Amino acid sequence: MQALVHKFGLSLLCLGVLLPTHAQAQSFRFVAVGDMPYSPQERQALDGEIRDAIATSQVPFVVHYGDFKGGGETCSESLFTARRDQIYGLLPGRVFYTPGDNDWTDCDRPFLKEPASELTQLDLMRRLFFDQPLDLPESWAYARQPNFPENARWQQNNVVFTTLHVLGTNNGRQEILLDDPELALSLVEARDQSNRVWLQEAFDAAQEAQALVVTVQADVTNPDGSGACTAYHRMNCDAFANFRDQLMRLAANFREQGQPAKPVLLVHGDTFPFCLDKKFGGEMAPNLWRLNAWGDFQSPPDATEITVQPSVMDEPFAVKTLLGQTAPQANCQ
């Protein structure tokens, strides 16, 4: 029997037919959407063709990477509730949402009809979006971080996923207009610390996994200041420097002994262009990719479909838009 398998296996290889491996069979897709809906057209698309395409795609879950409203919309509880129901209705019980700056830090802008305390809006957002845990199969190893329920972790086909509350407006360190700046910055620093812990725990949980995917809202390559933030340099600083450094260090060491580093993908929104950057990790972590996903007034309204295929060494993450099948730019610079 073994000889027959060997014989026919060689014959198939000679014909150019690749026998599927266990790792190849574990490839799967998921959908990411964010920086929308900003307009009536985007709301209509999200409720219509995007939701229909998600339903027919049979993906196991959807990730929304924040900004569920335009920056000019007033932050009311009725709007937040409507957006929650809309986002979670994309794939009921299988949507993971991480906040964007439009969703709370920017709610105090003076041009809004009713400016509101950003810290009050943060409490409202957490209450409305994370009051109940998802009911997921035990095999998903689903968890949320205590006191920071927006930080989630789960597993699919031996790939670990995590969300982190890292968002625009320099991660909440800019334009604190209706709250005590000292209190707001202290809460930012507590969130930064929680993110550091959660990211480390994600890599720890992924030791036996084939890949890791991290989702945040902010484009962490585009800070509103310079120099890493410290206890003495709190506002006009690079609010993402410490996160980038930690992510690159952990990604570089994400390997089994004697083996190449396993692939890591950072998914985010908040800026242009739609691109998949293979150079994000640099020489330190060439296994670290980043995807600036579709959204932020890009036309037509669409979502991003991501195929995770860790066994494909040169392309562990394949990306295209869900409706238009548009490929991302190969360079985010």
Image (cartoon, rainbow, N blue to C red):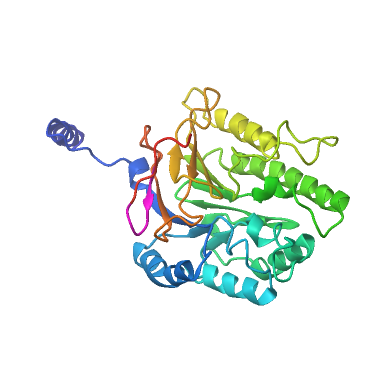
Percent x, y of residue 164: 63, 49
Q: Which residue is pictured at 54% across the width and 57% down the height?
A: 35
- The front one of 164 and 37 is 37
User: Eyeballing the image, is 309 above or below 179?
Assistant: above
Residue 91 at least partly seen? no
Residue 245 at least partly seen? yes
- The front one of 89 and 72 is 72
Would residue 13 appear left or right of 282 to someone viewing this image?
left
* Magenta stretch contains residue 322: yes
Q: Which residue is pictured at 61% across the width and 32% down the height?
A: 250
Percent x, y of residue 188: 77, 48
* Magenta stretch contains residue 251: no
User: Eyeballing the image, is 179 above or below 12?
Assistant: below
User: Eyeballing the image, is 81 above or below 287?
Assistant: below
User: Eyeballing the image, is 296 above or below 58?
Assistant: above
Percent x, y of residue 83: 58, 70
Tally of numbered discs: 0
Q: Residue furthest bottom?
A: 78
Q: Residue furthest front?
A: 111
Would residue 270 appear left or right of 42 to someone viewing this image?
right
- The front one of 289 and 100 is 100
Q: Which residue is pictured at 19% across the width and 32% down the height?
A: 6
Magenta extent: 318-325
Q: Quadrant of the N terminus?
A: top left
Query: Which quadrant of the view contains residue 48?
Result: bottom left
Percent x, y of residue 116: 76, 66
Would residue 151 appear left or right of 299 to someone viewing this image?
right
